[in-house]
Amino acid sequence: MNTFINAKDLGNLNVALKEALRIKKDRFSYKDLGRDKTLLMVFFNSSLRTRLSTQKAAMNLGMNTMILDINAGTWKLETERGVVMDADKPEHILEAIPVMGCYCDIIGVRSFAKLENKSDDYSENILKQFVQYSGKPVFSMEGATTHPLQSFADLITIEEFKTNSCPKVVLSWVPHPKSLPQAVPNSFADFMNEANINLVITHPEGYELDPKFVRKAPVEYDQMKAFRGADFVYAKNWSAFKDAYYGQILSEDHSWTIDIAKMNLTNNAKFMHCLPVRRNIVVTDEVIESSRSIVIQEAANREISSQTILKRMLETFKT
Ligand code: CP
């Protein structure tokens, strides 16, 4: 495996899922695979889970790890070609990336959408430049449009908690005071569709996601209706994707907050969220503290998700 950005990069998802569950049973069984290999994690944006879980996954595999926080102790990077660099950015990403590639064997990159220009964000320009110019295997630690490590962890979690072979999983838009990217819901839909999960998406009108990720998943504008019979509720806010409103907050409708009354409409559904989560806006204290909430187990599976990807990338050095 040389890149990991979308569900398809994993090949057969059932095979990947079985591999992840095997790793979870004995996460130190591959501790020689990463000996003398170095993972560089490059963060253009903040992180708690991705940073710790991916570092832990690399350590489980015997790797060395280096973390670079862009704009915190490094030179500010110019990312556009053709710019006269007379402002506050003394280094160009086109030199910085191959230099980073000299010091490591695998690179993880976090670079969020700026939500200013849809075609810029959806070009995944930063990730693509790392793929093109680093000379190393590259995986996304959340790009502008996808968060595959999160969604693979979500799929592992659903596999562990499901009580029937084809669970109904509802991806629900929820309110949020800040404008957020579509990366998590895009990837979630991508992985659920690829895994043949019974996915239903619910959001207020205007919040339609990129059809490339939604595919044939039904969209239900009535949240209560969508929740009926659900086995899992996956809450996430996102900003508008449509051209005219790209990156905007169209509604902060707090009637979409996940509360116990809504959870009681479901088939005793488990509550999921990628975290961090704003309590009593996205979900009530009562729901997130209840036995239905599996957000901590979900976050714990981030280690397994990352370890599966790193293991596959390390294995390519052996062939
Ligand atoms: N869910 C997730 O990616 O968390 P962090 O932003 O803390 O890494």
Image (cartoon, grey):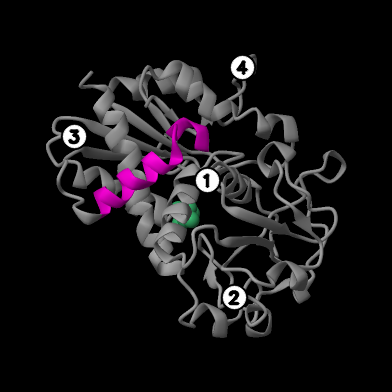
Magenta segment: 7-24
- Label 3 is placed on what type of residue? Gly
Residue, disc 3: 34
Q: Which mark is residue 195?
A: 1
Where 315 falls versus 204 (above or below)? Answer: above
Pointer 3 with pointer 1, Cβ within 8 A: no
Residue, disc 2: 267
- Label 1 is placed on what type of residue? Ala
Going 22% across and 55% down the picture, which residue do you hit? Answer: 25
Decide which of tag 3 and tag 4 comes sooner along the chain.
3
Q: Measured from the top left, where is residue 251 in percent x and y?
A: 82, 63
Q: CA distance from mark 3 to mark 1?
A: 29 Å
Q: Nearer the viewer, residue 108 or 11?
A: 11
- Residue 78 at least partly seen: no
Q: CA distance from mark 3 to mark 2?
A: 43 Å
Q: Which mark is residue 81?
A: 4
In this rendering, would 178 be left or right of 146? Answer: right
Determine whether the beta carbon of the residue marked 2 sits less than 8 angstroms from the nearest atom of ligand 1. Answer: no
* Outermost right residue: 244
Q: Which mark is residue 302?
A: none
Q: CA distance from mark 3 to mark 4?
A: 35 Å
Q: CA distance from mark 2 to mark 4?
A: 52 Å
Q: CA distance from mark 1 to mark 4?
A: 39 Å
Dot 2 falls on a residue whose secondary structure is: loop
